[in-house]
Amino acid sequence: MKLIQQHFPHFSSEQLNKLAFFHDLIIEWNEKINLISRKNIDKIEEQHLLHSLAIAKVIDFKDNSKILDVGTGGGFPGIPLAIVFPEVHFTFVDSIQKKINAVKDMVDRLDLENVRVIHGRAEKVNGKFDFVTARAVARTEKLVMWTRKKISGKSNGNTLANGYLLLKGGNLEEELEEVMLPYIKYSIAEMYEGEFFETKYVIYLAK
């Protein structure tokens, strides 16, 4: 976890060990089902863990915040965030059963007591949340349509108002303008070095 230690020197040994264990679990599960591209299996730390943790560069979630990770897939960005924010409550949802089975197993083996895992569609999840996170799940307008009513109107005291924290790449202006919500683009290339991050962003949208 050299890259993660470089960019997050305050992480505890327990957090780093869990991130390393998650790295190994992804490799293990990826031999059974396709959670991530097999051609990038040697770049998990950079392209999946560090990428997911860009959200932690944008916001330091207050304890007891509630996060809905939509289309969690192989557990990104949800699992890395749940590891580094153990006092924050995470709900992971995905409509693909085999991916949810993998995520449940990894959450159990990582002993993440702050996570619940749901098989289903985001719009069917019960409860209210401070933030919705997602990585390359759907066009932003669709994601907002599915989840807008899931975001609480009551703030938990975070530095950003309740809303969305999305990991996206490429030219996003047209996609974001159609949502008609105020937004901020945080360039991940300004957080980390490397070609992979050159066109990657954390997109924050206020509810």
Image (spheres, rainbow, N blue to C red):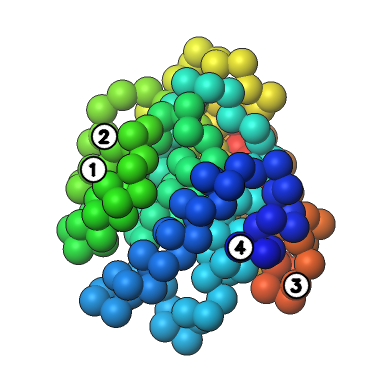
- The residue that disc 1 covers is 118
Does residue 137 lie above or below 41 as drawn?
above
> Pointer 2: what residue?
125
Q: Amino acid at mark 3?
A: Gly
Inspect the image, locate mark 1, and give the three-letter code of the amino acid beneath it. Ile
Cα–Cα gap, marks 1 and 2: 8 Å
- Please identify the residue farthest to the top as the structure is shown: 154
Tell me if 199 is positioned left or right of 91 in this view: right
Q: Secondary structure at mark 2?
A: loop
Q: What residue is shown with label 3?
A: 194
Where is residue 169? Give x, y as percent: 62, 64
User: Which residue is pictured at 41% across the width and 44% down the height?
Assistant: 69
Q: Check whether the beta carbons of the residues at disc 1 and disc 3 lie within 8 A of each other.
A: no
Mark 4 crowd level (few <14, some 14–19, many ≥20, 10 Å Cα)? some
Residue 194, relative to residue 133: is it above or below? below
Q: Nearer the viewer, mark 2 or mark 3?
A: 3
Q: Is residue 163 above or below residue 21?
A: above
Q: Is residue 85 visible?
A: yes
Q: Please tell me the numbered disc located at residue 106.
A: none
- Residue 179 drawn at (x, y percent): 55, 43
- Residue 8 picture location, percent across and down: 70, 49
